Amino acid sequence: MTQLDNHNNSSGQAGSFLEVLAVFFKLGLTSFGGPVAHIGYFRDELVIKRKWLGENSYADLVAMCQFLPGPASSQVGMGLGLLRAGFPGALAAWLGFTLPSAIAMILFALGVTNMDLASHGGWLHGLKVVAVAVVAQAVWGMARSLCPDRTRASLAILAAILVVLWPTAFGQVGAIVVGGIFGWKFLDIAGEQTGERLSTSLSRRTGVVLLAVFAALLLLLPVLASSSSNPIIQIFDSFYRTGSLVFGGGHVVLPLLQTEVVPSGWLDNELFLAGYGAAQAVPGPLFTFAAYLGGAIGHGPSGWGGGLLALVAVFLPSFLLVAGMLPFWDAFRVKPGAQSILRGVNAAVVGLLLAALYHPVWTSGILSASDFALGLAAFAGLMFWKIPPWLVVVLAATAGGLM
């Protein structure tokens, strides 16, 4: 590590809960643009301005969070809070960065579920159309960075075919597993490792306990949910499992959550996609879409209780994984096989998102030539004109209402 990194990490635990909360609450109110932009905001605020840690340590933290399942930008925030002020700091970073958009999404859920959808169908359909543009942009960007060669592009296409033909949670998990195995066998990247040591005060024993809790919940919650009629357990299981299996960024949560809440009858597809479109207009992590779903579902607690339950469940795996993995990251990241598996998984994730672009996003949003025209305009605004996503959402909803 550099001298600067050693200095910053040695003073990292001197931070307080309130200090971390204030910094991340400001970021939660102003961080538009998706996970890549969020990571840039974090770097500007905490590495450049506040010097909580050095460039090399920050790059290594980002690399670890991109390796783990879950929302990378939120995990980076939790890691920064953890390094600054311990476990209270991780909680403060999550609360500050997440609550502004989560509150907005629960309020939107309360508004949508208490209105006459027939009289507001136009702008709701505009939100579904803009979801097509947002997911198409995500597929485009992820494919360029994660599938730069024909081997990984072919793997992504095969994963998409698998998920389209087997549209269940098992098909999605199977595609990820196949991608990881393929990467381990055929995507050798020995000699490409970079980065410096990431220092943490957490012990390996603590890491083992946290990873064991993560695995135990992932294995036991489905058993409890299937043997119980308690909707709280069922909702917690669905959102915890989703948060545990999402590789590749926030947009990949779309097909996993759709599989959990729509076929079960907890929420209809129209409300699902309307919420996903609205989630593009708020700052902070896209995973707060879970708060909207928890607030809108007609199963068990809804409103504020359901929204907060879903929110905690979908983010809990990220906290357990980041804190559990930090003590082991230095030894793990130098293994070429680990990075090879990750490359295969990332290619499969592009396939999952490509399948979701077809169904449910395209099949529900593009129903006419005017829908296609609006979707193309929204895509061009996002991709080529670099219009802020929240403004594209507002314009698309307005155009949907007018049409």
Image (cartoon, helix red, strand yellow):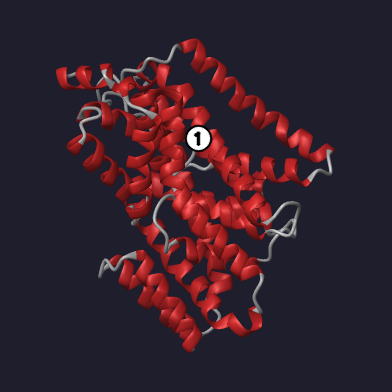
- State whether residue 9 is above or below residue 63: above
Q: Residue at x 36, y 58 (%)?
A: 140
Where, quadrant-wise, is the N terminus in this rendering?
top left
Question: Along the line of sight, which residue is nearer the eye, 395 or 59?
Answer: 395
List x then y, in percent, for residue 345: 47, 39
- Specify whether residue 82 is in view: yes
Q: Is residue 97 left or right of residue 169?
A: left
Q: Residues within 10 Å of mark 1 (few under 14, many from 20)?
A: many
Q: Residue placed at 62% from the left, 40% from the top? A: 241
* In this rendering, position of residue 300 left or right of residue 242: right
In the figure, 60 relative to 357: above or below? above
Specify whether 247 is left or right of 215: left
Amino acid type of the residue that numbered disc 1 sits on in the rendered structure? Ser
The residue furthest front is 18
User: In the image, what residue occupies the spot 60% across and 47% down?
Assistant: 308
Nearest to the observer: residue 191 or residue 294: 294
The residue positioned farthest toward the left in the image shown: 3
Q: Residue 92: percent from the left, percent from the top?
A: 43, 35
The reply to whether residue 160 is visible in this rendering is no
Which residue in the rendered view is the most extreme toward the bottom?
403
Residue that badge 1 annotates: 318
Residue 210 in which image quadrant = top right
Along the viewing direction, whichever of 33 and 358 lies nearer the viewer: 33
Count of numbered badges drawn on the protein: 1
Which quarter of the picture shows residue 2?
Answer: top left
Element type at marker 1?
A: helix
Q: Quadrant of residue 77?
A: top left
Name the foreground residue: 307 vs 63.
307
Spot occupied by residue 87 in the image (x, y as percentages of width and height): 45, 25
Horizontal and vertical percent position of residue 284: 40, 51
